Amino acid sequence: MTTVGELRAALPERASAWLETASARVGADPAALRTLFPGVGRHCGRGPLGIPEWTVDDAVRVLLLTAASDVVNELPGLYRYGDANEKRAVLRGLSFVDPNVFGLELVADALRTNDTRLVAAAMGEYAAARLDDSAYRHGVLKCVFMGIPLNAVAGLDRRTDEELVRMMRSFAAERTAAGRPVPDDLVALVPDLSREDS
Amino acid sequence: MRIFDPHIHMSSRTTNDYQAMYDAGVRALVEPAFWLGQPRTSVGSFTDYFDSLVGWEPFRASQFGIRHHCTIALNPKEANDPRCAGVLDVLPRYLEKDGVVAVGEIGYDSMTAEEDKVFAAQLALAIDHALPALVHTPHRDKAAGTERSIAVVRESGIEPERVVLDHLNEVTVRMVKESGCWMGFSIYPDTKMDEERMVAILREYGTERMLVNSAADWGKSDPLKTVRTAEAMLAAGFSADDVDLVLWRNPVEFYGQSGRLDLSEVDATAGEFEGNSVLRGARK
């Protein structure tokens, strides 16, 4: 998994400078996150970070969470009042700061949306380690259904079970019956996808 | 002809309106936060509305090639309802969002003590968040309300060139011009102001610091009144450059003071918002 050190090292100079000042503020007062979090893209940029799947604004927001004191009480508000970019960063941050009881609530909220950016971010390492079997399977199925590439989903190697495979086969059968294509990465995940006993 | 509508409530309009606006030359707009045509009863009703102004509505506009920005505030009508006062506490979060280009609509409705307090508090927020302010002038007792609004703006310490007083008419335009604030005019089918009167005002007071909007909402209004005013200006002998100044460069200059206007061309094919496409039937 990507580390704080790797994210920090990959930041462009302008973003590093802004992050340094902002980190000092949220270190002293976590409530400062409420007004610093939304403007990160304007101040630091939104381009690719140079680490696959990461943008500069995502990385700065996650690093800002790690710099805040007592961040756990701010997380629900940052997510509730966040726009889609802020929500995504909170979800990615769940693997970097301890969200206590709020973590799975935020994951569940994101999985209820139909926003591919949020659903993909929700199915990260944090969710892979904690979702119960049913919720995990439905999260994976929702990704497949929405066309989110499965390489964005954490934990498939250890959490794919017979029931998930059955659900995938059933999904593939429905698609095939409708004359619609089955996603390639599903074919790779499920051996013998078109078996008829599903 | 390119048009920037600096005040229109798109949440209450249809996709047909977006299409007609695009076809007529509208490429950018600002949607100020106001009431819903009926009173809200809780803070949650505001925050869901604000989420829509910074999320769903800009996405909907982008599907039609139009850039959508918004202003955020507790409006003067609902400033009087104690059930809504808690909105002030969540404003600082929203005033930092990328698509928010001013604090508004603020100002007076019935000129109560509560309105005084909320108006002043929100001008202070505009200063704190480095945003311009959009001030609604009251429909009743307009001249006195406008005069009092100018006084409150002056006391707040915000620079007058960062403030627009909106819904002006023949009676209120001069005092606003003299104050150094921007002058906003809402062109309506029957009431506030019409195209011909607007042209007469532009003749008398000039085109500088002038903003013309449709203020279209859920009431009887017309989202193409900006375009109709542009046509009336041309028919009255104003040049194409005058029209471009009033209907594009002026709003860009005013809201550009926020540093957050994004006027790059819209990629209308850019997918979906939270899984909802407004182009129903386009998906295969």
Image (cartoon, coloured by chain):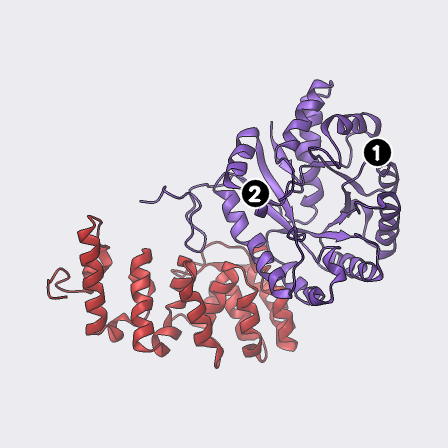
Chain colours: A red, B purple
Name the element at disc 2: loop
Q: Position of residue B232 (x, y in %)?
A: 70, 23
Read off the chain for label 1. Answer: B
Q: Position of residue B92 (x, y in %)?
A: 67, 63
Q: Which residue is mark 1?
A: B170
Horizontal placement of B273 versus B176: left or right? left
Q: Earlier in the sequence, mark 2 or mark 1?
A: 2
The answer to which quarter of the image holds residue B200 is top right
Indicate the amino acid at tag 2.
Arg
Name the element at disc 1: loop
Horizontal placement of A178 versus A45: left or right? left
The answer to which quarter of the image holds residue B250 is top right
Q: Quadrant of the C terminus of chain A?
A: bottom left
| Residue drawn where x is 46% and y is 67% of the image | A7
Q: Position of residue A86 (x, y in %)?
A: 52, 62
**Real-space CA distance between mark 2 and mark 1, rounded to the nearest whole angstrom:** 29 Å
Figure check: A105 above or below B151: below
Q: Which mark, by number, is residue B13?
A: 2
